Image (cartoon, grey):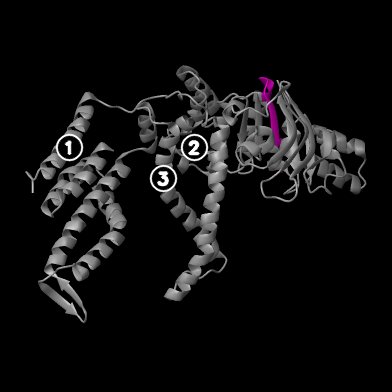
């Protein structure tokens, strides 16, 4: 979590193209390689970053204010070299942030996160919300796939022309959202019935391994981030 | 240890009509009470009310008195009530906490919330897993289990809380016969240990096997109540949308075919 947070902030603070690119190699690619999740990391982080990356590149390449060096002219729309350079910088930051977040997601067990947060004094409710947020997306994707299959089995056409696909989405979105809302209510009741809202500390069965070296690395990362911010703020690092 | 509902009525928030009316029911220590009724008769609502979740967790308006060992629980917060009354829902997926990585941790989740000492949690968890025959699943991810396995896991999680009163809404709905047997055995053992249990079930064979008393709801009111064998043989059962147990249906079919009642009794006793 510390690595993901410091990497994401450092990518923004560093700016430029080279800095975030090097950061991605050191803080995202290398740890992912060591953890054996590089393939999944690349796929997932690209999937996460693609929509925002595409829009950021298009907006900056074609509508960068003050761009002088024309690369391409499409009627009234002009692509400039300055816009392209800025778009690449933004892209590097987006990739660093999505890579760091994905690495965290792929290498952290939700149960470990919740217990570690609780061990550090965070309320179990906040820890639960943090974890539930991570769990919500795959759960909804799974529910949507089940509902799509069920609707197809009853003759719904979700393939073919764009218009047919759009029409096919409507009977799927409703059940997905309403089902999720109903599920949240029952899940809340089940948690209450299991004493989750009881005040005071819960008994923790175990604590995730946390060696002195890991703690030192975490503090080192925070110190490095603070130093980076100071260097940038004072103009020492440009 | 008695959980008592006296003159209880309940209306969901925003609903024009009450879902429960004038419910009088006592769950005594060591007793399993079966709850039957057609769809929309109020079984789930009665479970929610008995467990204290309605109106605490979902709002609505409650009338009448609910007490535990004579003490009115109206002012008790949910977390206090959850130390005495546990509730299991029909759908297994919504009962999983989503914050645990293994089946063992999921079963331990309730006792952990209650602040039970660590060694006791481990002992309770192992016992609950063993009772429901799912010890070999201990290290599995709860979200990757089948629906039936998840239901057994959810019930194990409730057993580990060692509640004085247990309310279950269709606990065997997703289970095969072997899973159903494990659950009924576990409930019988829990009742023998002194817990009182309210089980809402469509499967009247399950109620016939474990419940000493049965209640049948109709449109939110108690339509039939009494010893399970008597209630499940009541001729009004089918009119109330409840399918009688297999033994009762066989008896009725045999009688209709003109077979002597004594012979039927002997045959059923032999089976």
Residue at the disc numbered 3: A133
- Quadrant, the C terminus of chain B: top right
Q: Nearer the viewer, residue A65 or B26?
A: A65
Q: Chain of mark 3?
A: A
Q: Residues within 10 Å of mark 1 (few under 14, many from 20)?
A: some
In this picture, which residue range is highlighted in magenta? B191-203
For label 1, the SS is helix
- The answer for how far apart the CA atoms under marks 1 and 2 are is 37 Å
Q: Which residue: 18% across, 43% down?
A: A27
Q: Residues within 10 Å of mark 2 (few under 14, many from 20)?
A: many
Q: Nearer the viewer, residue B199 or A80?
A: A80
User: Quick check: is B198 in the magenta stretch?
Assistant: yes
Is residue B156 visible to us here? no
Q: Chain of mark 1?
A: A
Residue at the disc numbered 2: B97
Q: Nearer the viewer, mark 1 or mark 2?
A: 1
- The answer for how far apart the CA atoms under marks 3 and 2 are is 13 Å
């Amino acid at each position: 979590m510390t690595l993901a947070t410091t990497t994401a902030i450092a990518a923004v603070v560093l700016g430029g193209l080279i800095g975030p690119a090097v950061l991605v190699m050191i803080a995202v690619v290398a740890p992912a390689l060591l953890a054996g999740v590089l393939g999944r990391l690349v796929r997932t982080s690209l999937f996460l970053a693609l929509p925002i990356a595409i829009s950021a590149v298009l907006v900056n390449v074609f509508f960068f204010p003050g761009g002088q060096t024309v690369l391409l002219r499409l009627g009234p729309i002009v692509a400039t070299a300055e816009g392209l350079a800025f778009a690449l910088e933004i892209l590097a930051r987006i990739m660093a942030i999505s890579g760091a977040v994905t690495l965290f997601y792929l290498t952290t067990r939700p149960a470990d996160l919740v217990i570690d947060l609780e061990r550090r004094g965070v309320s179990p409710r906040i820890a639960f919300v943090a974890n539930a947020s991570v769990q919500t997306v795959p759960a909804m994707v799974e529910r949507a796939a089940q509902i799509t299959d069920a609707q197809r089995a009853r003759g719904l056409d979700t393939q073919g022309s764009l218009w047919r696909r759009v029409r096919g989405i409507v009977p799927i979105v409703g059940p997905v959202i309403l089902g999720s809302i109903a599920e949240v209510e029952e899940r809340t009741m089940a948690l209450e019935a299991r004493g989750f809202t009881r005040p005071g500390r819960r008994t923790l069965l175990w604590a995730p391994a946390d060696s002195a070296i890991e703690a030192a690395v975490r503090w080192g990362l925070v110190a490095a981030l603070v130093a980076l911010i100071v260097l940038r703020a004072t103009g020492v690092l440009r | 240890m008695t959980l008592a509902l006296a003159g209880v009525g309940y209306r969901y928030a925003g609903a024009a009509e009450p879902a429960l009316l004038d419910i009088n029911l006592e769950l005594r220590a060591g007793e399993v009470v079966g709850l039957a009724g057609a769809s929309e008769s109020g079984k789930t609502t009665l479970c929610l009310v008995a467990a204290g979740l309605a109106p605490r967790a979902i709002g609505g308006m409650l009338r009448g008195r609910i007490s535990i060992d004579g003490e009115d629980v109206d002012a008790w917060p949910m977390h206090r009530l959850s130390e005495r009354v546990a509730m299991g829902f029909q759908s297994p997926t919504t009962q999983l906490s989503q914050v645990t990585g293994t089946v063992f941790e999921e079963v331990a989740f309730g006792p952990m919330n209650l602040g039970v000492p660590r060694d006791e949690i481990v002992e309770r968890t192992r016992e609950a897993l063993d009772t429901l025959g799912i010890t070999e699943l201990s290290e599995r991810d709860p979200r990757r289990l089948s629906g039936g396995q998840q239901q057994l896991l959810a019930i194990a999680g409730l057993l580990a809380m060692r509640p004085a009163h247990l309310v279950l809404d269709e606990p065997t709905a997703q289970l095969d016969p072997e899973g159903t047997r494990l659950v009924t055995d576990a409930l019988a053992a829990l009742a023998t240990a002194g817990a009182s249990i309210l089980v809402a079930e469509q499967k009247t064979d399950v109620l016939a096997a474990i419940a000493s008393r049965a209640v049948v709801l109709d449109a939110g009111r108690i339509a039939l109540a009494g010893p399970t064998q008597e209630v499940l043989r009541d001729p009004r059962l089918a009119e109330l949308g409840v399918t009688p147990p297999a033994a009762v249906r066989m008896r009725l079919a045999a009688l209709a075919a003109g077979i002597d009642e004594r012979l039927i009794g002997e045959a059923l006793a032999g089976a």
